[in-house]
Amino acid sequence: MKTLLLVALLAAPVAFAEEVPRNNLVGASVVGFAGFLRLNIGSYEVFYERRFGSHAVMATFDFIHVHQASEHLGSHQWTFGGALTYRYFFDFAPGLFLGLKVGHRRGFGYFMAHSAEGAMDRTDLVNSQWSVVPQVGFRFEPLPWLRITTRFGLGYGPYAVTPRSRTDAAALEAAQLSRDTLATSALITDTEFSIGFAF
């Protein structure tokens, strides 16, 4: 009897630890590195997510640097922003989720044009974006405290790029070309590869 009681007392903390829900998640996504490859398909993100059963709400701070360069032209754009995301996780397929992300960004950049004679014309720019992006993704849980998440989103998010102080034709053209560097249309992709820690 004493042996059974001792085993039960030792097993109780283990069972309790296994039942502790891990509804909070903090982590980061590194897809923003694609901006250095002239691709705007996602951002560097730092996020906090809270689970409520099958539902989750996530707050995100994001950053991206996208550049386009050639022999005579160059555009560098930085954007900073945040987003709120709702996600629904399916019980029949653990890890699979659908979501909706709403975000806003503002940033700055510049465009440079080099003439054949070596003269440089620089235009300072500002940019902004509102976006609404449905998403589908999958979350892996290799360890009780570790989460690896991938997602793909396709949604609406036109960029606005304007010259900071100039309004001449060259400045307006620079803004147009730089907007196309960020996104050529209002249809945008938004991807994630993140590592998070649950607690």
Image: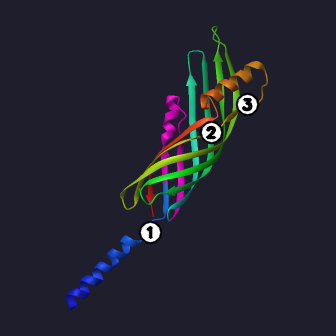
Of circles 3 and 1, which is in front? 1
Q: Residues within 10 Å of mark 1 (few under 14, many from 20)?
A: few
Q: Residue at x 53, y 33 (%)?
A: 35
Q: Which mark is residue 162?
A: 3
Amino acid type at mark 3:
Thr
Q: Which residue is mark 2?
A: 79
Cα separation between marks 3 and 2 = 14 Å
Tell me which numbered mark, 3 or 1, is placed earlier along the sequence.
1
Amino acid type at mark 1:
Pro
Q: Position of residue 157 (x, y in %)?
A: 64, 39
Say which quarter of the image contains residue 123. top right
Mark 1, secondary structure of its residue = loop
Q: Which mark is residue 21?
A: 1
| Screen quadrant of the N terminus | bottom left
| Screen quadrant of the C terminus | bottom left
Tell me which numbered mark, 3 or 2, is placed earlier along the sequence.
2
Q: Is residue 193 above or below residue 198?
A: above
* In the image, residue 43 lies in the stretch drawn in magenta: yes
Tell me which numbered mark, 1 or 2, is placed earlier along the sequence.
1
Q: Is residue 195 above or below residue 175?
A: below
Q: Position of residue 192 (x, y in %)?
A: 49, 44
Cα separation between marks 3 and 1 = 48 Å
Mark 2, secondary structure of its residue = strand
Q: Which mark is residue 52?
A: none
Of circles 1 and 2, which is in front? 1
Which contiguous range is marked in magenta? 27-52
Amino acid type at mark 2:
Thr
